[in-house]
Amino acid sequence: MDPSIILAAVDVETAAAYAETAGRAMGLGLGTGLAALGTGIGLGFIFGKTIEAVSRQPELKSEIQSIQWLGFALTEATVFYGFIAGLIAFFV
């Protein structure tokens, strides 16, 4: 099917509105996906280093774990920041 036939059936304003909505949706998905990717990498580092630290100094396990959970919470928050920023960009 020839694309010019499809474009002729839709006026320019409608096509522009569809393109804008599609761009916003792709930006939301891409932004949230990249935030989740970065968070996954960060959490891997946090838990990997926690395992190394506890294996080196088992007597500090409780202190290391408390710091680990703080790092986990702060790293996990970046996904929500990315998602909220994407929602703001999508709807505003």
Image (tube, rainbow, N blue to C red):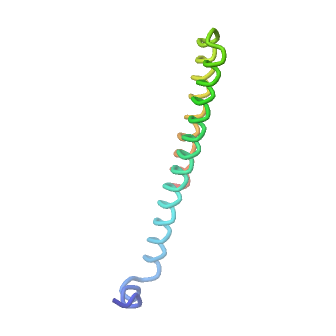
x, y percent for residue 75: 59, 34
x, y percent for residue 65: 58, 18
- Picture quadrant of residue 49: top right
Task: Give whichever of 36, 88 is nearer the camera.
Answer: 36
Left or right of 57 on screen, residue 77:
left
Left or right of 42 on screen, residue 13:
left
How many discs mark residues in the rendered view?
Answer: 0
**Vertical order, 53 against 88 (above or below):** above
Q: Residue at x 58, y 41 (%)?
A: 41
Q: Residue at x 61, y 12 (%)?
A: 58
- Picture quadrant of residue 78: top right
x, y percent for residue 9: 36, 86
Task: Give whichever of 70, 19 is nearer the camera.
Answer: 70
Quadrant location, the N terminus: bottom left
Query: Residue extending furthest front?
Result: 56
Q: Residue at x 46, y 66 (%)?
A: 22
**Vertical order, 68 against 19 (above or below):** above
Task: Give whichever of 89, 40 is nearer the camera.
Answer: 40
Quadrant location, the C terminus: bottom right
x, y percent for residue 50: 61, 24
Query: Residue extending furthest top?
Result: 59
Q: Residue at x 41, y 85 (%)?
A: 7
